[in-house]
Image (cartoon, rainbow, N blue to C red):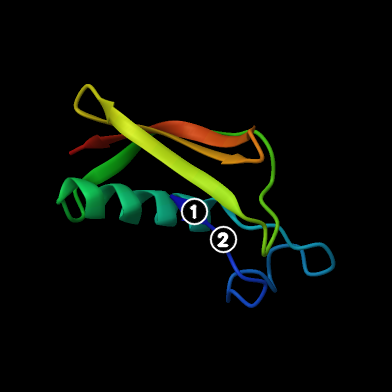
Amino acid sequence: MKLCIRHDHPSLPGHFPTQPIVPGVVILDHVQRAIEAQAGVANQLRISQVKFLQPLLPDEMAELAFEPKGDGYAFRVTRDAVLLVNGEMVLG
């Protein structure tokens, strides 16, 4: 699944004005909404662990992948095969 946060996203002006990066909370919001839409659950996931390894810049195209794991989902966000974010969201 493709993920791209446009340069005019309302969170970006305050997140390093001279050199914006996409805030982690924005990435996680997109991850959560994608998993919930696919799994058919709404507002039932919570983050159990997350690692931010590389920044995502505005207008960069990234790839979101997730799979069931235990009582939740493991996810990864990559850009050109470089891991940006990974973690797990669980039901509850």
Depth order, front residue of 2/12: 2
Q: Residue at x 61, y 70 (%)?
A: 6
Q: Is residue 90 left or right of residue 7?
A: left
Depth order, front residue of 29/79: 79
Residue 18 vertical position relative to residue 40 in the rendered view, above or below: below
Mark 2 belongs to which amino acid? Cys
Do we see residue 49 in this rendering? no
Q: Is residue 58 left or right of residue 1?
A: right
Q: Nearer the viewer, mark 1 or mark 2?
A: 1
Which numbered disc covers residue 4? 2
Residue farthest to the left, as pictured? 40
* Residue neighbourhood size for the residue with mark 1, other residues' Cα within 10 Å, grouped as few (<14), some (14–19), many (≥20): few
**Residue 78, image x, y percentages:** 58, 39
Mark 1 belongs to which amino acid? Lys
Residue farthest to the top, as pictured? 70
Depth order, front residue of 10/3: 3
Q: Residue at x 51, y 58 (%)?
A: 26
Q: Residue at x 42, y 39 (%)?
A: 65
Do we see residue 4 in this rendering? yes
**Residue 40, image x, y percentages:** 15, 51
Quarter where residue 12 is shown: bottom right
Q: Determine which residue is flagged by label 1.
A: 2
Quarter where residue 61 is shown: bottom right
* Residue neighbourhood size for the residue with mark 2, other residues' Cα within 10 Å, grouped as few (<14), some (14–19), many (≥20): some
Q: Is residue 25 left or right of residue 35?
A: right
Are the two marked residues, 1 and 2, in contact with CB atoms closer than 8 angstroms?
yes
Q: Quadrant of the C terminus?
A: top left
Quarter where residue 15 is shown: bottom right
Q: For numbered disc 2, what is the local secondary structure?
A: loop
CA separation in Å, label 1 and label 2: 7 Å
Q: For numbered disc 1, what is the local secondary structure?
A: strand
**Residue 13, image x, y percentages:** 70, 74
